[in-house]
Amino acid sequence: MTTTAVDSVAQSQAARDAVEEFPVVYDVPDDAALTDQILSPIWTRSRAWWPLFIVSGLLAVLFIYAMGVTFVRGIGSWGNNVPVAWAWGITDFVWWIGIGHAGTFISAFLILLNQRWRASINRFAESMTLFALVNASLFPILHLGRPWFFYWLIPYPATMGVWPNFKSSLPWDVAAVSTYFTVSLLFWYLGLVPDLAAARDRAPGITRRRIYGIFALGWRGSSQEWRHYRVAYTLLAGLATPLVISVHSIVSLDFAITQLPGWHSTIFPPYFVVGAIYSGLAMVLMLILPARRIFHLKDIITEAHLSNLAKLMLVTGSMLAYSYLCEAFVSWYSGDPFEYYTSFVARPLGPYAIIFWLMLCANILTPQLFWWKRMRTNTVVLFGASLLVFAGMWCERFIIIVGSLNRDFLPSSWHFYAPSWVDISLLAGSMGLFCFLFLAFLRWVPMVALSEVKRLHLDMRKERQPVKVRAADGAAS
Amino acid sequence: MTLIQPSRKRKPRARRVLGEFPSVESLLAGIDALKNGGYDTLETFTPFDIPELDARLGLRRSRIGWLVFTCGLIGMVLAFGIQWWANVHNYPLNSGGRPVFAIPSFIFPTFEGLVLAASFGAFFGVLAWLRLPRLWAPIDEVEGFTSASIDRFWIAVGAVDADDSGERAQQILRDSGAIQTIAPADV
Amino acid sequence: MSRRDFVSLVGATVALAGLSACVREPAEKILPYVDGGPDATPGAPLHFATSMTLDGYATGLLVTSHGGRPTKIEGNPEHPASLGAAGVFEQASVLQLYDPDRARYVQTGKRRGSWRTLSQEFSPATLRAHTGVRGAGLALLLAPTASPLISTMLDNVRNTYPDARTYFHDPLLNTGAAQSAIDTLGDSVIPQHDFRNADVIVSLGADFCAAGPFNLRYARDFGTRRRASGSGTNTLYVAECAPSPTGTLADHRIAASPATLGRIASALLQAMSADARFAGRVPANTLRGDTASNTLTAAERAWVKAAAADLAAHPGHGVVIAGPQQPAELHSIVHALNAITGNTGNTGSTVRYTKSQLIGDRDATHDLAALNTAIQAGGIDTLLILDGNPVYSAPADVPFRDAVGHVRNSVYLGLYNNETAKESKWMLPAAHYLESWGDGRAYDGTASLVQPLIAPLYGGRTVAEFLALIAGQSGISAHDLLQRSWRGHAAGSFGPWWDQTLARGVIADTAAPSTVTAIRWDSIGAAHAKLTVPVAPEQISMRFVPSPAVHDGQFANNGWLQELPHPITKLTWDNAAMLGAAFAERLGVARGDEVELKLRGRSLRVPALIVPGHANDVITLALGYGRAGAEGTARGVGSNANLIRTSSAPFTDVGVTVTRTGAHRDLAITQEHWSLEGRGDAILGVAEASAQSASKQPQPVPPTRKRRPLTLYEPPAPSADGFGADQWAMVIDLNTCTGCNACVVACQAENNIPVVGRESVLKSREMQWMRIDRYVEGQLDDPQVSVQPMLCQQCEKAPCEYVCPVDATVHSDDGLNEMIYNRCVGTRFCSNNCPYKVRRFNWFDYNGEIAETERMVKNPEVTIRSRGVMEKCTFCVQRIRSAQIDAQLANEPRTGPVVTACQQTCPTGAIIFGSLTDPSSEVVRLREDPRCFSALDSLGTVPRVRYLARDRADEVLAEVETPDERREG
């Protein structure tokens, strides 16, 4: 057996062992069986899938209905008012786009850092990014007073010679979100091409073979193809990583460029990016935990993944805690009475105090569980904690937006905000749409990056000699 | 097997011999053996990326990076230019008492323009470079070739022997551990 | 049929009738205010002088007409009751003209009648057949009026029907005040106050700056005096039950329940009579009874002492004024106080007396109760109710609804199919004053003409026309009746006199002359004795007050007024039991808790509203709500206070019991927070600056106020094309702003601001561009109340502008923060970044849902905003641009003076607008005043709107009085 430069990845095995408490992939059947396992949901129907798909589809219909109400009756069907001109809609927008961040982060950032545990979960994460972005990009349009004119934010040569105002952060948002969605889609799709080729080549029946064949673009895995593909994919990852940072930084500037107490803060860009990745990690966990169980993926999504994600949550959660602290400190240290009031009176004691404290508990206390290894691998704890962080991060956006707006400079304009049924339907409906799209993804798209897991599998076998192999690897010997 | 029939007759390529290997190790052994046997025009088909192959096959590093870089540069200039044209040149307005040429504000869309154009360059560049999508290729007609995307590793040997039998190349492939070889064909 | 269906149906009907399509000019010749004749440039607005009558007294107005549609009301500068200002009711009355709920046809029962059948039915012959040859069975019920025309017509009717009986009813009319004048001054005279010369003003329950027949004039005089530089300011003492606009202006205000107010008045009189300077002016033994001050608290005594000292120090230069709805005894004491201090006397005095101009204000034998008795007694066959809404506004002990039913034939002439119309056999649509020929008298007696700007939209007739009809003059038009009644008045040829008078609106030299009066001290003594009778402490008083929004209910169908925040409580679309904080705590009620008020065996459920500065042990409830007529807007809004109000105590009653019902009602309040949260200096200006100004010595300008904010950028250079030649700016004087809301309605009318309704106000979606912020500091029962008009501050470094993604709000060269409505996509980012929260958003298509007639009130100079668009004050940019165009056409080097709508109507003149590049403009001068500050200055927004900080002397009162108290103790 030739063991030359193949295991270049395994060179620092000792170092890896120190870091990796758990193997990133267990012994799995051979590549053919693995392929069939991953692709089987595409060819075979699962009993749990349809009810879930229908329920989430109904929620998506509710989403569309609430959107229709918003379009036909006007934005007044929401609970927004003056001073709280932005409320649930923008909360949902920031929240969804934040969730989207972990996808690209896991996928692109870990590629650059050569973190191979990304392989089995990056497809989940990237898909999550895309679907979260679908939701995220809907909310700013919905939230316009005249949504049918949303394209006025895009620079196009209008006959009147009017242009967007690039001093405003909203055209930045348009640029950032649309770029992010496009690049994420390209990145996702490019990564998917070899797996689509596998699906094409394993598809039962000519129709499916043709459909997947079209989407596989004629990928054959030749050395020429891999040579360019590798560089293009890595470059995309390299572009996507600063893009991730930029997107939520720009979203945070929607707040930071204003002078509203609670928004007017220079810490916002990193604070938002960290919070975004934090919430996205929670979402990834909430998606892979059931998927891992239902589709029997425990061999390829191992405790290593769970533990690493939990550790990342601990890290980002702690960074978030630091951000909270920093924000409060600056409010106090600045000596600005308005800032002080927002940080120390309006938020902790004001009308939304319950949400504020819920946010603090959920976002800061929850990840502290992950100091313990047992907690990091306990799926029930992981799921519960993710759910808490998931909700806590929504609360954070709500507190930042509504908690700042409802009590600003002039007490005369202070007013309480309460959501309308349309607001609630839009949030529930967007979750429904997300689940709908994600279930569709599970059903029709290879859910794990097959080609990468195969490669990882190979590397792992190299590392852990002798490898117990179930099927015919030894044909060469 | 035909997915989509070719619409017109393609120019026949050099006839090649194919070998199917069960593992990366045997694939690499096969390449070494073929090179030793004087076969230089080799192409592999693998289900996943094996970067080590580049050196053995004598492939240079992809130059797609330059394309991406150029696209990024164009995107950056374009994005900044649009903003300058719109807010400084064509329609300068007093907005909040800020200067019309507000470079700090223009940074963000400029960056996004760079990333977007570069990403388009990377994605469409690689497709163009590889002439994808190409839904049918002669090699698709080879029986069992579909395993190249699943768990088998294929070698295509070009410049087949003078007698066109390809027997020697097939022999080398078999000796290196190929589980199947295909006689010379226009693939 | 829902209201919306009804409105759209009505709208369609009107559209079919071609109402909105063609101009409906009156048939007779009407004359615009400015010279140049009625044939002006098409498209350019014209202004016509007319007058509006409220509570019997007329206020002269100038009405803007666009293509034959009256759209905007301003005050007539030549009219003494206006001096160019207009109040909320005058401003809003133009919306009433176009009210789609107005009565449209003559109706008998459910059938539609016509004026022709009516004129047969009510011809003298027919009437006499039913009511007797001398008209003994005929009764007329009118609102008290000072109109010479109606007076003449009434005389005609009396000549035709000598035995006909005439009654008068006005729910707000206080016969006590008239009675007091007769008792103490020997004649039915009314006081005329001159606040221009008043150094000291003591108001006993009088909101003279914002309510009452002459309030616009009084406010103007008061404001002029207070703002006059060099001569020092006046001092205002106010003792009142519920805080009022005038009360917020007070230097020394004290909350007093009705009983306490009487004792305060008596104590003041005692203190004055004891003053050595006025020795002998009060006959000995007049002021028997208790020493009033014994039952007063220390704070009340301090207030009385300070007011007495101040009045004594300024003999002849003080005004003591009692509220029009105060009891007779209080009015008597006030007459005495003015007499002692020499405020009355000659024609130049601060207080003069003139004969009352009102018909029917003094005669209790001709009021509604008397009519009711007459009907119950039988003998009245035909009842003519002309104007008013007596079935609604009758006191609870006068079952007038039943009385109308007892009459064989009844006629109601009114604007709406209201409660009275429903009970009457005949409903006749009245003409709105903007559709009428007529006249009226102001409070001071000055007569003015009413000329129509538009032919009656629904074929309405005036009271005078109907009176002429029953007097057998049905063939004569109101125009001719009016000309006939004034024909004798013209000095020379009638034609030119008429044209000139009609154009100017005011009939010169018709003010009532002063009368000489002498005090009858015995009646003063009686009043004093009555006021000082100790009352049981557990007695809770009940006050019924006119609503500052809907008055007595006649404006209840006016959306602008229903949505107008109460000047103090900021309550809209409702009335509530207003009560003091300590009292509320004792009762255990919180805001919005429903309480049951039981008074004289009747009960009413209303929501409670705690008002800082409201006296305790007393409930104040506004009249005019709880309407049950056919008016769609008014119906179901608030509770009808008339249901527990009795004719014996129509304004102040005692013995009410208050119990919680346990229910809760949401109150649509536009400003929910009273507190300044320690931000007073940033919002209302720095106290030191006020103190400096109060010391009346020129002070160097504090450097902190004049600094330019730190900025990285040079200010943009003004453009060369001339539009940057002016730099518009506004200064608002918080010393004279009463918070009366006149500017709010003026802005609403000028700028086509929609009405959003109660549900939207509950969601904080009100649309008024100008709002009056009200802040309260200190003790809730004795607070310092501040008001601050808040409108777009037109920041030079506008935070709203740079966040707009589509450049829908940008800065003009002349310093305006502009809104480009059709560019706005509605991100609302600008509102978030506006520290003043003065931007308003069209959450729904508010303008798409209004009736066809209501569209006619829209100002064509101002864009109608669609759904999803942000809007805000633009300094009346349409007026600025119009003035610029005029200047350019005339080749003037400088744009003439531009007056914004809020400035134009402000009764006290607290709003000053002008260009910073005009060295002669008052704005430039006032911006150099040390009191001048910009709100939230530290944010660096550099507002073009600045404020003059309020002078406060409250602390001074406490310092002066403390040693006195110590000595007494």
Image (cartoon, coloured by chain):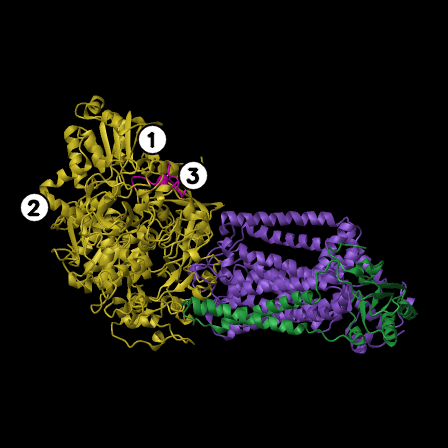
Chain colours: A purple, B green, C yellow
Mark 2 crowd level (few <14, some 14–19, many ≥20, 10 Å Cα): few
Residue C298 percent across, percent down from the top left: 32, 61
The amino acid on which the numbered mark 1 sits, given as a three-letter code, is Glu
User: Which chain letter goes with mark 1?
Assistant: C
Tag 3 secondary structure = helix
In front: label 1 or label 2: 2
Q: Which residue is mark 3?
A: C3
Q: Is residue A30 left or right of residue C934?
A: right
Q: Considering only order in the chain, which callout, 2 or 1, is on the residue closer to the N terminus?
A: 1
Residue C403 percent across, percent down from the top left: 31, 30
Label 1 and label 3 in one chain: yes
Label 1 and label 2 in one chain: yes
Residue B143 percent across, percent down from the top left: 85, 58
Q: Considering only order in the chain, which callout, 3 or 2, is on the residue closer to the N terminus?
A: 3
Most foreground residue, C591 or C888: C888
What is the number of the mark on residue C491? 2
> What type of secondary structure mainly makes up the magenta span?
loop
Residue A167 percent across, percent down from the top left: 48, 68
Q: Which residue is mark 1?
A: C423
The amino acid on which the numbered mark 3 sits, given as a three-letter code, is Arg
Tag 2 secondary structure = loop
The amino acid on which the numbered mark 2 sits, given as a three-letter code, is Ala
What is the number of the mark on residue C88? none
Mark 3 crowd level (few <14, some 14–19, many ≥20, 10 Å Cα): few
